[in-house]
Image (spheres, rainbow, N blue to C red):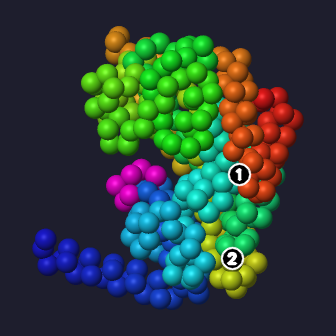
Amino acid sequence: MNKLTTIGTVALATVLSSSAMAADFNFKFQSSDPSGDKNFQVQKEWVERVATLSSGRINIDLLPVNSVFKHTETLDAIKMGILDGHITATGYFSGKDPAFGLIGNTVGAWSDTSQLLQYINYGGGFELMTELYAPYGIKFIGGSTTGVESFVSKVPLNGVEDLKNLKLRAPEGLVQQVFAAAGASPVNLPGSEVFTGLSKGVIDAADYTVFSTNQKAGMNDIATHPVQPGFHSLPLIDISMNQKKWDKLPADLKEILIVSVRDFAQDITTQLKIADQAAVKAAKANPNITIHDWSSDERKKFRAIARTQWESFSKKSPNAKKVYQSVTQYLEENGLL
């Protein structure tokens, strides 16, 4: 690095540091994603946008997963005032209340990101999340998601009937319950062992992640019958912060944060969808890969099965029952169940 570059770097760091100190409000948020993930990069873009929209009055220091607390502990960290906020998957707090697990990933409920975002913004989800977070002293600013997860499979899957006796990897809890109810045989495997499990025949399919990530990891090369778009998993991602610190913000900055989160939701789902589209195109060019897209009827069949498990899960707490009633009412009113 030459002298001029060094001087420029130091000057930039000084400007950024001065900008943070000059901000009226400085907040420390933690993400549930590692710094190398695309998700985290889009979150950083949101932080920069908030600074611009607020004319530098809000500065958010966004930390990657586990920087200060484990991803399952940020709720307590915000309540204690050690963190000011988080960007995280709501389902991580199901240990606090099963309601967070049910609204965080209502398995089988959503076939498209727009459906979940419409529920959160216009179908009662925002108000419900506000109520669920209130006892923890946390303000729900807004919700987002990533993308409907693809389904990895070594065998053709064209509908619910094909799930019977299917040996698949799925995380414990509601996801396994739903697949078991559909006739599949769920297996406990950490995400790090999915590729090996498929390669060695330990499993025939897996609930893993979005299509572009699967394609990049080579999953579709060994499990050549992916289901895309997926039919099962779409996580709720929430951006929230300490209620007392939220209350100290002037009205215009509160509105900037609320609107910016809606923009963030559109931004991240669009960017990941673009990545998935490119990955699907690459997969279709491979004659060994066959992509399966379930019909709306088959998706509704899966939802009907999933609903029995949502109902079972809803009995675990009064708040979980509220989530069940809210989500199912929305799905019924919109012809999705």
Question: Nearer the observer, disc 1 or disc 2?
Answer: 1
Q: Is residue 249 above or below residue 114?
A: below
Q: Does the magenta segment cover residue 38?
A: yes
Residue at image location 78% in from the left, 56% down from the top:
318
Q: Which residue is mark 1?
A: 316
> For the C terminus, which image quadrant?
top right
Q: Position of residue 36 (x, y in %)?
A: 34, 55
Please name the amino acid that badge 2 sits on: Gly
Q: Is residue 246 above or below residue 311?
A: below
**Residue 321 visible in the displayed image:** yes
Q: Position of residue 29 (x, y in %)?
A: 51, 72
Residue at image location 70% in from the left, 67% down from the top:
133
Q: Position of residue 48 (x, y in %)?
A: 50, 67
Looking at the rendered structure, the secondary structure element under dot 1 is loop
Report whether 141 appears left or right of 322. Answer: left
Looking at the rendered structure, the secondary structure element under dot 2 is loop
Tell me the quarter of the picture where residue 299 sits.
Answer: top right
Q: Which residue is mark 2?
A: 137
Magenta-tinted stretch: 34-40
- Few, some or many C-alpha atoms within 10 Å of disc 2 (few <14, some 14-19, many ≥20)? some
Q: Which mark is residue 90?
A: none
Q: Does the magenta segment cover residue 36?
A: yes
Residue at image location 22% in from the left, 81% down from the top:
7
Mark 1 in CB contact with mark 2 (< 8 angstroms):
no
Residue at image location 32% in from the left, 38% down from the top:
193
Tell me the quarter of the picture where residue 304 sits.
Answer: top right
